[in-house]
Amino acid sequence: MAERTLRVALAGNPNAGKSTIFNVLTGSHQHVGNWPGKTVEKKEGFFEYRGLRVEMVDLPGTYSLSAYSPEEQIAQEYITEEHPDVVVNVIDASNFERNLYLTTQLLEIGVPLILVLNVWDVAQQLGYKIDVEKLSQLLGVPVLTAIASKGVGIAELKEALYRAAEHREEIRPREGLVKYEHALERAVRQLTEAIEQLPDLEGYRPRWLAVKLLEGDKHAERVISAHPQGAEVLALREKLKARLKHTYDDEIDIAFADGRYAFVRGLSRHVLTMPHRPPTTLSDRIDRIVTNRVLGIPLFLFLMYIVFNLVQTVSAPFMDWIDELFSGPITAWTLAALSAGHAPAWLVSLIADGIIAGVGSILVFVPGLMVMFFALAFLEDSGYLARAAFLMDKAMSFLGLNGRAFIPMILGFGCNVPAVYATRTIENRAARILTGILIPFMSCSARLPVYVVFGLALFGAHAGIVIWSLYLIGIVIASIAGWVLSHLVFTEVQKSVFVLELPHYRMPTLMTLWLHTWEHTSEFIRKAGTVILGISLLLWMLLNLPWGVKNPQQSYFGKVSSAIAPIYKPAGFGTWQAAGALVSGFVAKEVVISTMAQVYLSEPTSTAQAPAQLHPLEDLKQIVVNFGKATIDAAKAFLNVLTPGVNLFPKHGAEVSETGLSRTLSRAFTPLSAFAFLVYVLLYTPCVATVAAQAQEYGWRWALFSIALSLTTAWIAATGVYQIGLLLGFH
Amino acid sequence: MAHNAMPLSMAKVGEEVKVIEVRGGQRLRRRLIELGFTPGTRVRILQDHGGPLLLAIGNSRLAMGRGMAHKILVTTETPVIQGSAHG
């Protein structure tokens, strides 16, 4: 349909509502990836309006444009090198001056610009009066107002973009709008004149290059030095810098930053009037309670309790539903189809025990992860998570980390993989890596099924306290490891500084929450899922080779496991079955249970033969009915959690037909060796997906370091538990 | 002016102060300036738990580590009378 295309980049401060505008405009037409060679998220999307196809890129949220952080570098390079047709600068109107700093830099670049004063309602409540027309006049670019979270102003933005497609040059800010104080301005002009002599600047504005060169910007230096006649310009730059040094010492770039603020202040004198004493906002009132010295931390712990409770209780019915779906109808139908086609026995086994079981074991985690991601997206988008970082900063400083590291750590309880990616928000590299290495000690949701199965088999009524103690052990070990590592290995983290903006509280929209949830869940399915499936197939092969082995111990898998088993003798679980389960648990911790089911109940799964009769319609009806039941159960559980007096570890999963396994487990393990085993499962090696994420973020060296650290820690802790337990007379 | 200058980290909860100067390394200073800590800007201390500070600057709320707050030199809005019992 669309005949023309408009390429638009969204730029703005973090928390200005950029993503909300992006989501409202592009809806489901978006794609999330990474910037080439960077670990910063790249969001692209499009929409169509009156025959115009608008392609959008959501640039990383930044306070300024320079080469200091990867985010700023990406935003600056995109705008200057990819030449978007229009840049939409989203501004938090309730925080006008601070947001306009970035705007001055966009004006200097000279890209066609549209300003959107977002969060307009909050600005009004604060009594801010902004003369939009005058602002537009002074800057020479269109200025719109919006309340993106309510969809207000979106139609106007679309219309403005439509007009921009026709008259792009009219909204290009004029050169020299932002002026600096005398000495700086003279140097800028002199350098600009020299740059103007260079032919073929590929769309770079000479004045922008001049300012950036004087600021010492690496990107501008690269552009000029790549130019055949660039050497002269660089020489002049050195001369001018030497002269400016008399006035500004080593702080020429700070003088430029000051100059931009002076411009912003001058601008706001013309267009902004605000009450002398700003009224106390609802956000401030909430903060008085939430960040209160006494109430803050208990409130935070209570919220976390609610979140984990939700994850377990709301997802449990759906997990059971998926589990039944895969072990029941899907397996039955597939087997029927295979036997109808006279498939050979190995193929039947591969598909039923390998592929279907593998896919099932991935999908069974999806409900839990979705609830977790949804809850965390809510905490993050509402603005609460930043408060939690503030509250926990002091506690984190014990680990040599600051409050920023706290958010990824919390995410780790859900799934270590997104937690590792979340460390990107930590500026200091050493602190980032240290956090990423400590995250695996946070007991992720994949470990919970292992605790639950063992807990019910061996600890009965005390299962709850056993599981709780495992979470606690993880935190204690992370604290010790953090303290040691920050003093021995990551000594630079001590110097890292902490500053974090606390956004105003707001009610996240369901759409945004859903987009976040789906984004993270699908990332898990793609990244972790493919790995888990691959390894379950490998495991199936090892268990069934040499082909025809009756006893799993004789399979290749059994042989490898038997070779490893003696290492675990001092920890009390030196059997080949336990060792084998641990090996396969490297794929994903929950696989420990399915492997145990396979090796202990030597008949691999109950799926070896096709049922006598199929009732596809019955089955379908049952699936739908069960889904409905699961939804009702989940809704009940949800309401239950939101009312006080709930129990932390409901016995979900208890009904799953693992009674055979739990009987075997209670014979194969003693309570003490089972506890040592659980401690080991908690601490030993991050799963493959986490290791892959670590390698991607910090390089293979640190990923391997993390494996080595956790394996050693786990062995020492499990052996310690077992040996001390023996000494104390437990068994 | 400078007679009642102090680091931001020493200001009291509820107090409103004015930024005089930002010290520290170039990178840190630039970062603080980008966040709005330019001379003359008013900053209010909302919370102080002994760890980081919770600040109001303009209409934004910032959590700031003590180390960073040490580097920002401020003055109280209303001049403090020398020698009075304060804090």
Image (spheres, grey):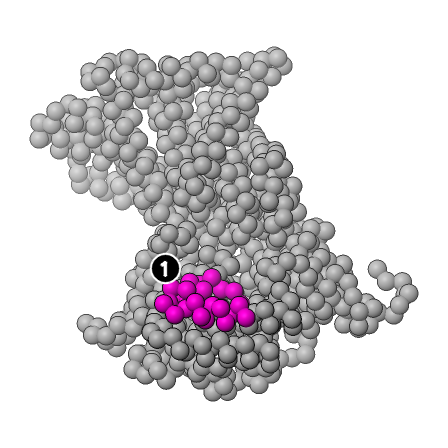
**Is residue A54 in view from this perspective?**
yes
Residue depicted at 46% across the width and 16% down the height: A567
- Check disc 1 and report its element: helix, strand or loop: strand
Q: Which residues are magenta?
A: A214-239
- Residue A219: in magenta span: yes
Residue at the far right: name it.
B83
Q: Is residue B54 above or below residue A609?
A: below
Identify the image quadrant of residue A620: top left
- Residue A139: in magenta span: no
- Label 1 marks a residue whose chain is A
Pick whichever, A414 or A90, lies toward us.
A90
Residue B63 x %, y % = 62, 57
Q: Which residue is mark 1?
A: A43
Residue depicted at 61% across the width and 12% down the height: A727
Which quadrant of the rendered structure holds the C terminus of chain B? Answer: bottom right
Residue A113 x %, y % = 41, 77
Q: Is residue A385 above or below residue A556?
A: below
Which quadrant of the rendered structure holds the N terminus of chain B? Answer: bottom right
Residue A245 x %, y % = 62, 69
Residue at the far left: name it.
A341
* Principal secondary structure, stretch drawn in magenta: helix
Pick whichever, A235 or A278, lies toward us.
A235
**Is residue A78 in view from this perspective?**
no
**Three-letter amino acid code of the residue under disc 1:** Lys
Residue B12 x %, y % = 76, 61
Horizontal side of A327 relative to A467 (left or right) equals: left
The total of numbered circles placed on residues is: 1
Pick whichever, A19 or A428, lies toward us.
A428
Residue depicted at 61% across the width and 60% down the height: B26
